[in-house]
């Protein structure tokens, strides 16, 4: 009897998911719970997507007209099995090539796309690139740390190609919670000399004996660890714009950043 209740409950759950309007629960019209839904599989799927798919589809999956992979939007209804087949075999007479991926590898990409759809902003606010650039230049004062196409400071990461490297949802997270994820190349370091002088800057290199960083004046500094009183990683100086920018303004800035793809 207990087994019958379990089976009945499972059938109800599948029926609810199949009829759901939530894009997090569907990539096509008739999804099923994927076998590869662990954090490891989603992470591996994301890595494969960035290495294989993002060159044409973009990091957000929305570079091809009529298709938004990150939101589960396609030119026709797609099941998970359909997507796996396309990833592996390509689409004849189109730029979509075949790959040498296994079913398991392709399924991980599909799991990653489902996870991405679930993490997309639920707000209906759409951003404006022109307004976003104005906010970047003025209210955000972003050029005081960042550089775009040769304009701005070198202290923070160069954003000239950020739209090719990061997804919109990741950029939004960086704006509202900049310490949530700091890439190794963007870490800051703090040193205190024996005379008590404190220097904080972006870490360029560190080894067993020395530390090299770029200080707040954009000057390259090198220190021997044995000559320092203290040294260690410092929090990112990137401020949070969660309370500084409105939801619309955040969407505008993200749209501007996504548009930066190294083309002037």
Image: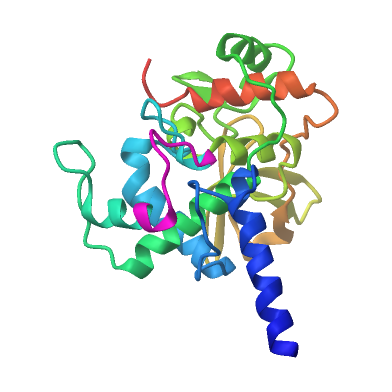
Q: Quadrant of the N terminus?
A: bottom right
Q: Quadrant of the C terminus?
A: top left
Left or right, 57 with respect to 225, comes to left
> In the image, what residue occupies the spot 41% across and 46% down?
78
Secondary structure mostly seen in the magenta stretch: loop
> In the image, what residue occupies the spot 81% across and 50% down?
196
Left or right, 4 with respect to 218, comes to right
Image coords of residue 12 (percent x, y): 68, 65
Image coords of residue 234 (percent x, y): 73, 51
Left or right, 21 with respect to 95, comes to right
Q: Nearer the viewer, residue 15 or 22?
A: 15
> In the image, what residue occupies the spot 36% across and 29% down?
64
Q: Nearer the viewer, residue 234 or 138?
A: 138
Quadrant in the picture for residue 16: bottom right
Image coords of residue 210 (percent x, y): 55, 60
In the image, farthest residue toward the bottom: 1
Residue 81 forms part of the magenta stretch:
yes
Taking the image as drawn, is residue 212 in sight? no
How many dots with numbers?
0
- Residue 117 to residue 164: above or below: below
- Residue 203 to residue 255: above or below: below
Left or right, 108 with respect to 127, comes to left
In the image, farthest residue toward the right: 243
Image coords of residue 204 (percent x, y): 52, 48
Residue 187 forms part of the magenta stretch:
no
- Residue 205 to residue 249: above or below: below
Q: Nearer the viewer, residue 65 or 216?
A: 65
- The range drawn in magenta is 71-82
Tell me how the rendering is colored: rainbow
């Amino acid at each position: 009897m207990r087994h019958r209740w379990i089976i009945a409950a499972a059938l109800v759950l599948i029926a609810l998911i199949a009829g759901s309007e939530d894009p997090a629960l569907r990539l096509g019209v008739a999804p099923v719970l994927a076998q590869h839904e662990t954090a490891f599989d989603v992470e591996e799927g994301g890595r494969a997507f960035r290495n294989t798919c993002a060159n044409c589809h973009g990091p957000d999956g929305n570079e091809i007209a009529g298709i938004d992979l990150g939101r589960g939007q396609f030119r026709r209804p797609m099941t998970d099995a359909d997507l796996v087949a396309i990833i592996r075999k390509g689409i004849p007479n189109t730029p979509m090539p075949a790959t040498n991926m296994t079913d398991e590898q392709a399924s991980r990409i599909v799991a990653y796309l489902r996870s991405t759809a679930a993490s997309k902003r639920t707000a209906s606010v759409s951003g404006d690139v022109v307004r976003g650039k104005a906010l970047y230049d003025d209210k955000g004062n972003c050029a005081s740390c960042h550089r775009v196409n040769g304009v701005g400071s070198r202290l923070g990461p160069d954003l000239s190609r950020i739209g090719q490297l990061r997804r919109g949802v990741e950029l939004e997270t960086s704006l509202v919670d900049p310490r949530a994820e700091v890439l190794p190349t963007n870490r800051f370091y703090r040193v205190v000399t024996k005379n008590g002088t404190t220097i904080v800057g972006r870490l360029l290199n560190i080894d067993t004996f020395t530390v090299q960083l770029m200080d707040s004046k954009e000057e390259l500094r090198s220190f021997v660890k044995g000559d320092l009183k203290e040294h260690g990683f410092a929090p990112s100086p990137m401020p949070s714009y969660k309370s500084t920018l409105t939801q619309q303004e955040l969407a505008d800035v993200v749209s501007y950043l996504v548009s930066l793809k190294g083309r002037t």
